[in-house]
Image (cartoon, rainbow, N blue to C red):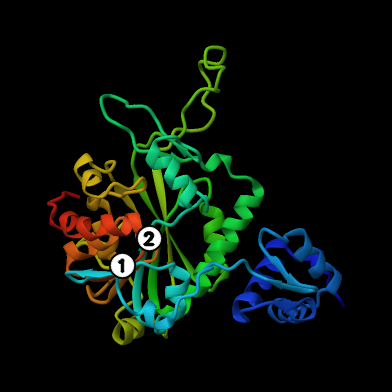
Amino acid sequence: MVYRAERQPPGKIRDAIVGHLLANPGPASVSEILEGVNRQLGVPCSASSVRSYLRLNEGTVFYRAGRGQYALPDACPEEASPASLCVPSFTTGRATWFEQDCFQWLASRRAESIHAVVTDPPYGLVEYSEVEQAKLRAGKGGVWRIPPAFDGHQRAPVPRFTTLSAEDVRLLEVFFLRWARALLPVLVPGAHVFVASNPLLSYAVASAVVSAGFQRRGEVVRLVMTMRGGDRPKNAHEEFPDVSVMARSMWEPWLVFRKPLDGRVQDNLRQWGTGGLRRKSAEQPFGDVIVSSPTQPRERALAPHPSLKPQAFLRQIVRAALPLGRGIVLDPFAGSGSTLAAAEALGYESVGIEKDPFYVSVARDAIPELARLTVRD
């Protein structure tokens, strides 16, 4: 019996096409893509269905490289030699920093050489572009919501995820699918991956990362009061005083994934030092709810980044990521270096990847300063 592409869930067809193009870099013909899709799905799809899907998503998810030839948008438009990717921008303590695009760096990294990932990735895919960063630094907003001062404190800007269209979310899924597939071979078996997310988009990220081959291992709830949500209808707040457009955000999800084990957990721990999470103490396991304050002004002064997470929270996540207290923690979207600072405070080896030169210069000084801070859980 022949199953047509439209009878398959659209996400599966998309993931199969992306998977084939990731495994075979460079433009591919419709017939080559069709063969790869059929192989991954295990059922035949019609060429017209695959061709229609490519054309419908041309210019967004895929681009046409020639007549009947399609490819993924280049995540790394500027070529870099493998040798240049091996040279760190700087090192401080046990932390090593690379000013690179993370896709380039992951492609050059030795397989099975990273033991954990803790990261807060971009979600709008535009909010960290040069244009939007310039607007943010000028205080003019753009995709960033610049809230007024409140209770005598200047509030940090936040990206407006509610403005994302359905197409933006599809692109987000493709981005995380590509990222997770590039990350998987670099990790040792049993390595845990902690990804900061938000309630509006966590489902899309989780689906993409699991499709890439990771196991979903729950999520950590960071209990923290933010400025997101809770507002009355814009320009109608007096008419509807008892209505909030959406619930006030009082928590932040951190998605938890694991690369499949090499044997049993105990086998993996003996071989790779990974597979589980480090307990807080002999009596207390690591829990999936962490009460957290917003990032303190003293930390923001050291590392001015709009998505900066507090050391008191990050150190708990980073500590748990290496069950035996040894290995390398990677942050592929390192920003101003807060994850590496947490690792440094714990005595862990770490690697950070960041392509924005502004944040690279901030991180150079911020990592040792943040690491020296005394914080309380």
> Which residue is located at x 27 percent, y 41 percent?
293
Label 2 packing within 10 angstroms: few (<14), some (14-19), many (20+): many
Q: Furthest residue to the top? A: 238
Query: Circle 2 is placed at which residue position?
Result: 119
Residue located beneath label 1 in the image: 321
Residue nearest the viewer, comparing 279 with 302: 302
Query: Of callouts 1 and 2, which one flags the residue occurring earlier in the amino acid sequence?
Result: 2
At mark 1, the secondary structure is: helix
From this view, report whether residue 171 is shown above or below residue 115.
Answer: above
For the residues labelled 1 and 2, the Cα–Cα distance comes to 12 Å
User: Does residue 261 show up?
Assistant: no
Q: Is residue 256 visible?
A: yes
Q: Position of residue 196 (x, y in %)?
A: 41, 55
Q: Position of 244 compared to 61: left or right?
A: left
Where, by quadrant of the figure, is residue 278 drawn?
Answer: bottom left
Which quadrant of the structure image shows residue 42? bottom right
From the viewer's perspective, tell me whether residue 343 is left or right of residue 18: left
Q: Secondary structure at mark 2?
A: strand
Q: Which residue sits at x=77%, y=59%? A: 56
Give percent across and percent down for residue 246: 52, 32
